[in-house]
């Protein structure tokens, strides 16, 4: 197993932003200025012997400063496609494989090796373009993007420059109820095809780095948004919607922890009312949607603080990294301009030509997309909280749809899936496709409870057995003799016995301690092994408790 070594690669120390960190409080950002506090403390020590009163300087509080500015946010998202082979060669790719075990002369960039386009890459690009409501280019091409980096063996990346395969689209997003809810529409500038680079493996000593080229040549789709987002929450929900979309389409697993979905965020701020954009800063190293939101919120606050201090010139076009531990962004490098890449058409690949027949075939194969599914669930009368939960995961949505297809009550089906089933999956670390409960049996369980065959308590017991071991609802009811007792005379006998066995509690109840009703009901349920119909039981119990004999 060969590894490529690069010695003498210099690493520049990261430049930390020293002046502030921000924390949320009641929806605003409050700033604690570390370096400023130190300066004030020094001044106080120097002036401790001075009898003169130092006048205070009043400034706007950070929450008021934020209200004076508007953030402009756009996101570049790279989606790694789950094709069987790489974009331009026959090498497979498997996340976590041993370094340099899935490479060939093409993805290693060896002289004379020629790329051949994987047709699945085009198919997946068209699928995503249609799902994002984009206009598709019937004739597009590939370009060479020139730049040097040790994990880029050819010295250039095959990408698309001036004629992307899709452009001018949009995506609809529903914000979570806990963040105020609401509907947003974010523009999509373009979607283009390209290949991924390799990966640098840095040693602990920092004396050298190793290069793993397994990832080199893996197909990517880059989705560039319009600068339509204004808050960290909006950006995080936009990214989450893209993840849902690629999973629904089956073009990518969208796992951020594996690098299958990577977000680079561009942020600038401007005073409210100003039309001109501010200086754009890019943030990388965002490996979760929560880190996207927090990094944006921090960066907005950092830039606002600099503006308010008259130091707007310190906001430069650069790439910054998000430090999860420190909860702040730090300088990585100055941002390269577009001209640095020296694009020109890829001479070793022909253009990509689409036909209407090809597009119609892909369009007809698209599944029901998240936005359409959410509107359908909403029209069923489900709350937005239910809608967002059920539509978030395509497997959960399909399970729910299959359950209600068996004429199960819609709201009850949603409640069972969002409640006991979701809790079981979380505890057991299982997905809904891994539990042994089927949608048909969940529908049968709901019908059995609603029809009075079994109680809700018995239903829960059956549910957990079905999820763990499988089987059928009717089979378990018969096997364990779980049919609910609805015979009035049989329940009356049990109530009479419980009251006779507890004369002291009965006396206390009739003396005004009415909370004991729950005690009696529990005793009857225990005697019936949980099979007594709760409604009928409570009706009979109240009649007998309130009747003096």
Image (tube, helix red, strand yellow):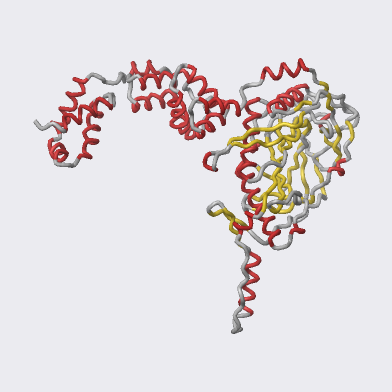
Left or right, 439 with respect to 290, comes to left
The x and y percentages for residue 235 are 65, 42
Residue 288 shows in the view: no
| Residue under the image location 77 percent in, 58 percent down | 313
Residue in front for this viewpoint, 98 or 387: 387
Q: Position of residue 214 (x, y in %)?
A: 75, 33
Residue 53 position (above or below residue 316): below
- Quadrant where the N terminus is found in the figure: top right
Q: Nearer the viewer, residue 64 or 300?
A: 64
In the rendered image, residue 353, in percent from the top left (x then y), is placed at 83, 21
Q: Residue at x 87, y 26 (%)?
A: 349
The residue most toward the front is 273
* Residue 383 visible in the shown view: yes
Residue displayed at 87% across by 43% down: 339
Q: Nearer the viewer, residue 11 or 225?
A: 225
Q: Examine the rendered structure and indicate whether residue 182 appears above or below residue 525.
A: below
Which residue sits at x=24%, y=29%? 538
Residue 425 x, y percent position in the rendering? 49, 31
Picture quadrant of residue 151: top right
Is residue 65 toward the left or the right of residue 320 in the image? left
Q: Quadrant of residue 256?
A: top right
The quadrant where residue 535 appears: top left
* Quadrant placement of the C terminus: top left
Which is nearer the eye, 11 or 324? Answer: 324
């Amino acid at each position: 197993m060969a590894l490529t070594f690069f010695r003498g690669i210099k690493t520049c120390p990261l430049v930390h932003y020293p002046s502030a960190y921000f924390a949320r409080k009641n929806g605003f950002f409050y700033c604690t200025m570390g370096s400023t506090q130190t300066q004030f403390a020094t001044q106080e020590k120097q002036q401790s012997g001075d009898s003169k009163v130092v006048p205070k300087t009043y400034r706007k509080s950070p929450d008021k400063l934020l209200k004076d500015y508007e953030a402009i946010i756009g996101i570049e998202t790279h989606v790694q496609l789950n094709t069987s082979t790489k974009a331009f060669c026959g090498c497979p790719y498997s996340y976590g494989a041993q370094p340099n075990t899935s490479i060939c002369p093409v993805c290693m960039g060896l002289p004379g090796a020629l790329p051949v386009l994987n047709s699945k890459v085009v198919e997946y690009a068209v699928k995503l373009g249609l799902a994002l409501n984009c206009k598709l280019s019937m004739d597009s091409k590939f370009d060479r993007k020139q730049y040097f980096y040790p994990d880029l063996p050819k010295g250039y990346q095959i990408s698309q420059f001036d004629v992307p395969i899709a452009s001018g689209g949009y995506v609809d997003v529903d914000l979570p109820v806990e963040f105020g809810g609401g509907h947003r529409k974010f523009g999509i500038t373009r979607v283009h095809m390209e290949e991924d680079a390799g990966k640098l493996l840095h040693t602990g000593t920092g004396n050298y780095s190793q290069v793993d080229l397994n990832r080199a040549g893996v197909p990517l789709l880059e989705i560039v948004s319009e600068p339509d987002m204004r808050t960290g929450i909006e950006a995080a929900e936009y990214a989450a919607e893209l993840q849902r979309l690629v999973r629904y389409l089956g073009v990518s697993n969208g796992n951020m922890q594996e690098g299958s979905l990577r977000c680079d965020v561009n942020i600038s701020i401007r005073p409210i009312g100003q039309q001109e954009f501010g200086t754009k800063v890019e943030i990388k190293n965002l490996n979760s949607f929560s880190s996207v939101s927090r990094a944006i919120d921090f960066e907005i606050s950092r830039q606002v603080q600099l503006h308010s201090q008259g130091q707007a010139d310190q906001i430069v076009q650069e790439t910054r990294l998000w430090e999860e531990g420190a909860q702040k962004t730090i300088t990585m490098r100055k941002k390269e301009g577009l001209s640095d890449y020296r694009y020109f058409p890829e001479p070793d690949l022909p253009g990509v030509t689409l036909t209407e027949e090809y597009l119609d075939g892909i369009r007809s194969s698209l599944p029901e997309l998240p936005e359409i599914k959410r509107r359908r669930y909403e029209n069923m009368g489900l709350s937005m909280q239910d809608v967002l939960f059920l539509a978030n995961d395509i497997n959960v949505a399909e399970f729910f749809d299959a359950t209600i297809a068996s004429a199960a009550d819609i709201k009850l089906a949603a409640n069972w899936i969002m409640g006991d089933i979701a809790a079981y999956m979380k505890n057991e670390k299982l997905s809904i496709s891994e539990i042994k409960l089927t949608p048909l049996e969940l529908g049968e369980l709901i019908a059995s409870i609603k029809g009075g065959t079994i109680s809700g308590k018995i239903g829960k017991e059956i549910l957990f057995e079905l999820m763990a071991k499988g089987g059928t609802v009717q089979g378990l009811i018969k096997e364990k003799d779980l049919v609910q007792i609805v015979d009035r005379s049989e329940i009356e006998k049990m109530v009479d016995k419980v009251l006779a066995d507890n004369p002291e509690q009965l006396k206390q109840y009739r003396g005004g301690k009415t909370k004991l009703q729950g005690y009696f009901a529990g005793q009857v349920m225990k005697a019936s092994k949980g099979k007594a119909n709760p409604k009928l039981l409570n009706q009979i119990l109240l009649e007998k408790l309130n009747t003096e004999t």
